[in-house]
Every structure is written in structure tokens, then in C-alpha cells.
Image (cartoon, helix red, strand yellow):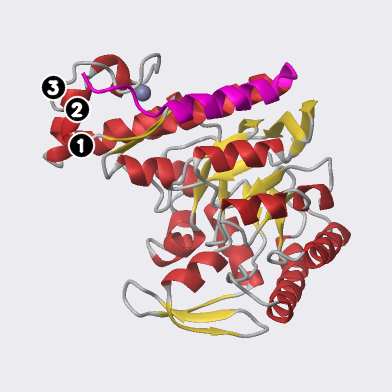
């Protein structure tokens, strides 16, 4: 069985569809929870699946350092290692090596660096990134690229994009022909429309199974990101999935889906769940706040997750304040469930050609803010 993408419905520029892989179907638009170190923190894999996730994201940089790709391969691959038998997408390591590693040296060949954990020396190249992602057994492999920093003037953005396109070609060659597995190229070009177009053209000529829009959500802000998303998805092949890496807040996702993006990942629902912050249809809620201390109501009326069906705001406030482990577990579950309900809502709205009404309702509810204190 091969990797295949099918668009089932369109509403404006938005698309609803499915990706078929040997490890199962991915409904799009899709949100991928982040399992950085072979775990979605605080959740069992079957619980992550229960929230509605079809696919997880793993981080090449973290896994190559600990426990190492070779060790995971010897133990049967990442799916078996972490007990998740559905699709996994791994990033190329390029973004995190630039944001986390020490003593980085970027050359045409790749990036030489020292581990942020123990100072050990490593080299990531397109070829090594493809090898690591193959050892992990990743279903969707990302080409090795340089995430252009923001802001970048046009000359810098061009040089960075052109390097990434040469690395995309090397990634394609190193990946080879692996039926059932997919390789995604990554568009760069910062906020420059012409550079984005050139990048899309270069990637399309190489030929990938999907295309990511890279270099966004790096501090440019939502308005500028949406400006780029007004044209960037349309520069990429229509019949392949489009993935916006590292995005984002619920309203970022909704706006990007409207602009033709099919896949997302972000640490926000899981990371904020561990700090007492919940995401609901009426915006974000800080459970640490004293207003919840005597509140017997659920975190979010109508949510079917355990945090909302079995516990009160008062209980969640209590365990958040005491930094109990269950606080992070319950709020992570709720946040992932909220994100998946949002994605299901978007898919249903596109399928029935009522996305505009869905988005209007989404913004109207958020504008109301959280329910009044008791
Ligand atoms: Zn809930």
C-alpha cells in the first residue's frame, strides 16, 4: 500500500480530505500532537488516540541524542518503542539543532553541533537526517532544511532558501524509493512572495509526497503569517498535502485552514496543559486563578474528556495549585481533545460547505470570553 492523499471536499480555499498510509488513515485538516522524546508528556498512547489523533510528531534532534536512532532501530523502531502503531511524522532536526544545540557550524554540507545535553559532537546533513528518520521508522519524513530566521532581509532569505533547495534535492536522493513512506519538501522564502514562488517551483521540480510551509510561526506574528498564507499554499501543488509546521494557537489554525493548509503540529496544547492553562471554545482559561476555587462546574460544558466529565474546575484548580501530576495529565487530555474537536468541526464544516459560518461562530464564542465566575 502506498501513501495517498485525496481531497474529499472544498470550501473556498479550504480542503477536507484523507491521507492513507499503511499504518492508518489521517483525516485532514489534521492536528498532530507532539511526542518530542517518544512520548506525548503525561498521556498514554491509547489516551492520545482517544482524543482523536490520527498521527503524532516525533523530534529527530531529541531522539538522535537520546536514546539515539540506532538504539531505537535495534529495539524495533519508534512505533514499537513508544507503543504507537499509527502514523508518525518526524521533523528533520534542522529547526531544533539551530534553536537548541551549541557550537553550531553551518556549511554547505550540513550543520555540525554540540549536544545541549552532554556536549557530544554531531553532524546533521540531509543524508544523515534521512538515515535517522529511516532508522526511526517514520511514516512521513521531512526534508532537511534551514528554517530562515525572522526577520531576514531579502538577500539573506534568498541565500537561505537556495541552500534549503539544494538540501531538498539531496534529501530526495538520500530518501530513495520507499513505498508506503512519504517524504515532504519544505518551502522557504521568508515573507517574500517571489522567493516563496521560486522555492515552490524548485520543490515541485524535485517532486515530493507533500509540502510544508516552513519559516513561519518564528516570531513574525499572525497578521504577517496570514499575509504569507494568502499566497504560499496556492504556490504548492494542489493535489498534495500542505503542512504548516509548528502552528499553532486555535485561531492560527482556523485562519490557516481557511487559506488551504491541511496539517498542523504544535506543543501548545500539551505544554500549556502542564502549566495550568486550558483551551476552550471561549478562549484560554488559567486554572491557577483563584476564581475557580469554589467552582463546581466543568472546565468546558459539552466537552467529553475526563477532565470535564469527571472533575470540577475547583478540583482542577486544586491539583494545579499543588502541582500534582494529575493536573498536567487532565489538562493535557482536555487540550488535545479540544484541538481535535476543533479539527473535526473544521472538517465537518468544509464537507458541508459552511466553513464561513463555522468560523464566525468560532470567533463569536471566543469574543465572549470564559464563563462568568460563580
Ligand atoms: Zn474537556
Q: Are marks 2 and 3 in contact (CB under 8 Å)?
A: yes
Q: For mark 2, what is the residue?
A: 292
Q: Position of residue 289 (x, y in %)?
A: 20, 36
Q: Which stretch did the figure color magenta?
A: 351-374
Q: For mark 3, what is the residue?
A: 294
Q: Is mark 1 within 8 Å of ligand 1?
A: no
Q: Is mark 3 within 8 Å of ligand 1?
A: no
**Marks 1 and 2, how far apart in space?**
6 Å
Does label 3 or label 1 sit earlier along the sequence? 1
Q: For mark 1, what is the residue?
A: 289
Position of the C terminus, as image quadrant, is: top left
320 to the left or right of 246? left
Q: Are marks 1 and 2 in contact (CB under 8 Å)?
A: yes
Quadrant housing residue 314: top left
Against 201, is 76 above or below? above
The structure residue drawn at horizontal position 69% and vertical position 25%, both measured from the top left corner, is: 356
Residue 371 lies in the magenta-colored region:
yes
Q: Position of residue 278 (x, y in %)?
A: 34, 34
Return the mark for residue 157: none
Can residue 212 be seen in this snapshot? no
The structure residue drawn at horizontal position 57% and vertical position 61%, both measured from the top left corner, is: 220
Can residue 217 be seen in this snapshot? yes
314 to the left or right of 11? left
Amino acid at each position: 500500500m502506498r501513501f495517498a492523499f485525496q481531497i474529499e471536499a472544498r470550501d473556498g480555499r479550504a480542503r477536507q480530505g484523507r491521507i492513507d498510509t499503511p499504518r492508518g488513515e489521517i483525516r485532514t485538516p489534521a492536528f498532530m500532537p507532539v511526542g518530542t522524546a517518544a512520548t506525548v508528556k503525561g498521556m498514554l498512547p491509547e489516551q492520545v488516540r482517544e482524543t482523536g489523533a490520527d498521527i503524532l510528531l516525533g523530534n529527530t534532534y531529541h531522539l538522535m541524542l537520546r536514546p539515539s536512532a540506532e538504539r531505537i532501530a535495534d529495539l524495533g523502531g519508534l512505533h514499537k518503542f513508544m507503543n504507537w502503531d499509527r502514523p508518525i511524522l518526524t521533523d528533520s532536526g534542522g529547526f531544533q539543532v539551530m534553536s537548541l544545540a551549541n557550537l553550531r557550524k553551518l556549511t554547505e554540507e550540513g550543520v555540525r553541533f554540540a549536544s545541549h545535553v552532554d556536549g557530544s559532537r554531531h553532524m546533521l546533513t540531509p543524508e544523515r537526517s534521512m538515515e535517522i528518520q529511516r532508522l526511526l521508522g517514520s511514516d512521513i519524513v521531512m526534508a532537511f532544511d534551514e528554517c530562515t530566521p525572522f526577520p531576514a532581509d531579502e538577500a539573506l532569505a534568498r541565500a537561505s532558501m537556495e541552500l534549503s533547495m539544494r538540501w531538498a534535492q539531496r534529501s530526495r536522493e538520500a530518501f530513495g524509493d520507499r513505498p508506503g513512506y512519504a517524504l515532504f519538501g519544505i518551502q522557504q522564502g521568508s515573507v517574500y512572495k517571489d522567493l516563496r514562488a521560486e522555492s515552490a517551483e524548485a520543490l515541485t521540480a524535485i517532486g515530493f509526497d507533500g509540502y510544508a510551509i516552513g519559516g513561519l510561526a518564528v516570531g513574525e506574528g499572525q497578521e504577517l503569517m496570514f499575509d504569507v498564507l494568502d499566497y504560499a499554499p496556492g504556490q504548492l501543488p494542489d493535489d498534495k498535502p500542505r503542512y504548516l509546521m509548528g502552528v499553532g494557537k486555535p485561531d492560527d489554525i482556523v485562519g490557516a485552514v481557511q487559506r488551504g493548509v491541511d496539517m498542523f503540529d504544535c506543543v501548545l496544547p500539551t505544554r500549556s496543559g502542564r502549566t495550568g492553562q486550558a483551551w476552550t471554545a471561549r478562549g484560554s482559561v488559567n486554572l491557577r486563578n483563584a476564581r475557580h476555587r469554589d467552582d463546581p462546574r466543568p472546565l468546558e460544558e459539552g466537552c467529553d474528556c475526563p477532565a470535564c466529565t469527571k472533575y470540577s474546575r475547583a478540583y482542577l484548580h486544586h491539583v494545579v495549585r499543588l502541582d500534582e501530576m494529575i493536573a498536567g495529565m487532565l489538562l493535557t487530555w482536555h487540550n488535545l481533545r479540544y484541538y481535535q474537536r476543533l479539527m473535526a468541526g473544521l472538517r465537518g464544516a468544509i464537507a458541508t460547505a459552511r466553513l464561513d459560518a463555522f468560523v464566525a461562530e468560532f470567533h463569536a464564542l471566543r469574543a465572549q470570553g470564559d464563563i462568568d465566575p460563580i
